Image: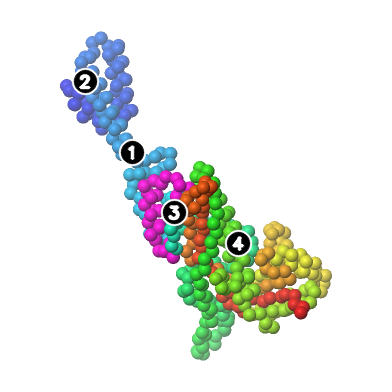
Amino acid sequence: MKFKTVQEAFNYYRTKEIKEIETRASEIGKLIDSDPSANIEALNIELDGLKQAKENIIEKRSKSNKGFNPITGMDFNKEIVIPEGPDLFKAKEYRSAFFKSMLGQKLTETEKNIYNKAKMEKRAENFSTMTNSAAVLPTQTLNEIIEKARKQGGLISACRNFNIPSNLSVPVGTPSSKANWHVEGVNVESETVDTASVKFSAYEIIKIFSMSAVSNEMTLEAFESYLETELNNCVMDTLNEALISGTGSGQGTGLITGITWDATNSLTYADKPAYTDFTKMLAMLKRGYGANAKFAMNNSSLYNLVYGLTDTTGRPIFTTDAQQQQVNYILGKQVVIDDNIPDDTIILGDFNYMGYNIPEGILLEVSRESSFKSGLIDYRSLAIADCKPIVPEAFLKLSKTVTP
């Protein structure tokens, strides 16, 4: 095909594929070199049209893909919708913005928008701060901190985790009676379901820790891992201690201090507990709580008081799961080890009726001014939390007789 003008050749080839254009250009080059009778002028016109068509296609593709990064898969031409409410703190953009902000690293425009919106959300309204950066931990990180605390054992691994607003009374179901066989045509009386209500207060748990300014060079993954460990050790350990011995004054209420112990829910022993003390506890536990009941004690009590005990046939009452060696049982009930429990004290109960609440997550604040002279960066973790027994009758205590 002969073209009279470059524009004509361009219009013909502008809708073709680049490979087809390059193949035709190669053919023209061979014709010019090998065919003395070829119309050089016409072929040069076609070559110029091919060149302009190829450049036009490349330019169009470049414009359409200028916001796409083939390595990360990010498409910046696509409008990013910032989520609302709790979903905001689950977004990966918020998670990235959170840790970059804590490290003093530069945020992208999207990260800036989502981070600023997060600080305006109701979730952070319960906290007031004057530091130069403050935000609520991303949901995924908070969940990992709680999961890590539960995996490390202690009473927090067995108790019920709530996420409800502070000072709001919430009903919690208690075991009800079983259904009855019905005689056809006979009226059945309705049963009023027994429920217990729980109202968690708003107490503060605060921890301040410092890091060198060199921490700015940490990767986001390394910094997140450090925070998970640090916050688990300080915030969750404090909460775990309160689950047992919290006074209820300016802090959560614990099992030991929050339940009135008397002859109806506690037993004592003189020197060491006997096998029958454990069977009596199981017999005293009210109906409905036994299926999920666990024994709780510290490590010293386990090995000094329980480990060598046997039943009337000489079999040890303490056994270990052969497949999961960290899971232990007393008379078929799982054992929870927590060194916050006082020596010589053993608790039996359904720990689903002992709860802790972290309604607003954990706020992390950073200040680069408070340790100006030392070159350190101060981080402050702040959690609004509470804990308390929900149904006292779900628990029994076995302890050593107090001698006057």
Q: Which residue does the numbered mark 2 point to in the structure image?
A: 45
Q: Residues within 10 Å of mark 2 (few under 14, many from 20)?
A: some
**Sequence order check: which comes first, mark 3 or mark 4?**
3
From the viewer's perspective, tell me whether residue 17 is left or right of residue 118.
Answer: left
**Front-lying residue, 75 or 251:** 251
Foreground mark, 2 or 4, reads 4
Disc 2 to disc 3, how far (Cα)? Answer: 64 Å
User: From mark 3 to mark 1, how far is it between C-alphas?
Assistant: 33 Å
Circle nearer the viewer, 2 or 1: 1
Instruction: Please state the horizontal and vertical placement of residue 365, each as a whole percent of the image.
Output: 48, 56
- Report the front residue among 182 and 319: 319
The tag on residue 329 is none
Q: CA distance from mark 2 to mark 1?
A: 32 Å
Task: Return the disc, 3 or 1, that comes first in the chain's sequence.
Answer: 1
Dot 1 falls on a residue whose secondary structure is loop
Taking the image as shown, residue 306 lies to the left or right of residue 359, namely: right
Please identify, in this view, whether the residue under mark 3 or under mark 1 is nearer the observer: 3
